[in-house]
């Protein structure tokens, strides 16, 4: 009886070893693709962070790594014949919730993406005078963050303009002559200010 159990165990181990060797090239391809995707996406994140702000680069890299590891594990399990129906259903539901979350914060994401485009194309600089025709808003650029561009009007009041409006409205620009701070530098200062704890927090 014991001898029969040992033989069955040994046979099962041999089958597992044979399947492992047989599917090893496919597993290697999956791992290489995941590694190359991770490296490419990390370089893209570094590229954007160098031109905007490094605040989001760390969390974005960790999220991408976690997603690729999960996808690689699922793919490898599928190669070896594991039943992943329930796992794929859960993953699909999770992705659907993430998609709904993106839709819910679409305006915020729109402003962030438009901020990146503003930093690339530089349609204005700190110190420039801008005038929106509709609605009628006019002022001097004094600040930029990932959501708003802040203008100071003739009366001294601050007006916050959502960054996505710069790609939807006609804007008049009069270059300033006293600006010494670029948009990228101003954004870095704002990010550093937000990350620095105030005295009241200590």
Image (cartoon, rainbow, N blue to C red):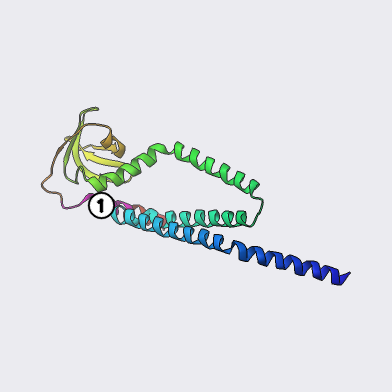
At x 80% / y 66%, what residue is drawn?
A: 8
User: To which quarter of the image does residue 147 belong?
Assistant: top left
- In the image shown, does 33 or 137 lie closer to the viewer? 33
Q: Does residue 4 sit above or below 161 in this rendering?
A: below
In percent of the image, x 51 and y 60: which residue is there? 29
**Rendered location of residue 130, percent (x, y):** 18, 37
Instruction: Check disc 1 and report the residue beneath it.
Output: 184
Image coordinates of residue 81 in percent, x first then y, are 65, 54
Q: Is residue 180 left or right of residue 12?
A: left
Position of the N terminus, as image quadrant, is bottom right
Q: Is residue 199 shown left or right of residue 102?
A: left
Residue 149 screen position, x and y as percent: 27, 41
Residue 189 covered by magenta stretch: yes
Magenta-drawn stretch contains 188 = yes
- Residue sticking out furthest to the right: 1
Q: Nearer the viewer, residue 175 or 87?
A: 87
Please rate how many residues cluster around mark 1, counting C-alpha atoms within 10 Å: few if below 14, some from 14 to 19, many from 20.
Answer: many
Give the position of the C terminus as an image quadrant: bottom left
- Tell me the SS state at disc 1: helix
Look at the image and give the residue range highlighted in magenta: 180-191
Residue 84 falls left or right of residue 44:
right
Q: Where is residue 43 in the image (x, y as percent from the top left)?
A: 36, 58
User: Of residues 85 and 167, which is closer to you in this image?
Assistant: 85
- Magenta stretch: helix, strand or loop mostly: helix
Count of number-bearing discs? 1
Residue 123 visible (yes or no):
yes
Residue 198 visible in the current orientation:
no
The outermost residue toward the left is 177
């Amino acid at each position: 009886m014991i001898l029969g159990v040992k033989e069955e165990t040994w046979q099962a181990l041999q089958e597992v070893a044979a399947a492992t060797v047989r599917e090893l090239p496919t597993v290697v391809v999956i791992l290489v693709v995941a590694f190359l995707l991770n490296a490419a996406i990390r370089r893209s994140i570094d590229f954007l962070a160098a031109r905007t702000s490094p605040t989001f680069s760390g969390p974005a890299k960790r999220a991408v790594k976690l997603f690729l590891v999960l996808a690689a594990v699922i793919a490898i399990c599928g190669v070896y014949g594991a039943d992943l129906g329930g796992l794929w259903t859960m993953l699909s539901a999770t992705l659907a919730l993430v998609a709904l979350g993106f839709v819910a914060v679409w305006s915020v994401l729109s402003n962030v993406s438009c901020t990146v485009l503003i930093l690339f194309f530089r349609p204005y600089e700190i110190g420039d005078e801008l005038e929106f025709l509709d609605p009628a808003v006019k002022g001097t650029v004094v600040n930029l963050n990932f959501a708003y561009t802040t203008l100071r009007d003739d009366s001294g009041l601050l007006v916050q303009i959502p960054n996505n409006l710069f790609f939807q409205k006609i804007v008049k620009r009069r270059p300033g002559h006293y600006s010494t701070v670029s948009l990228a530098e101003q954004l870095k200062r704002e990010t550093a200010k937000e990350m620095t704890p105030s005295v009241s927090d200590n």
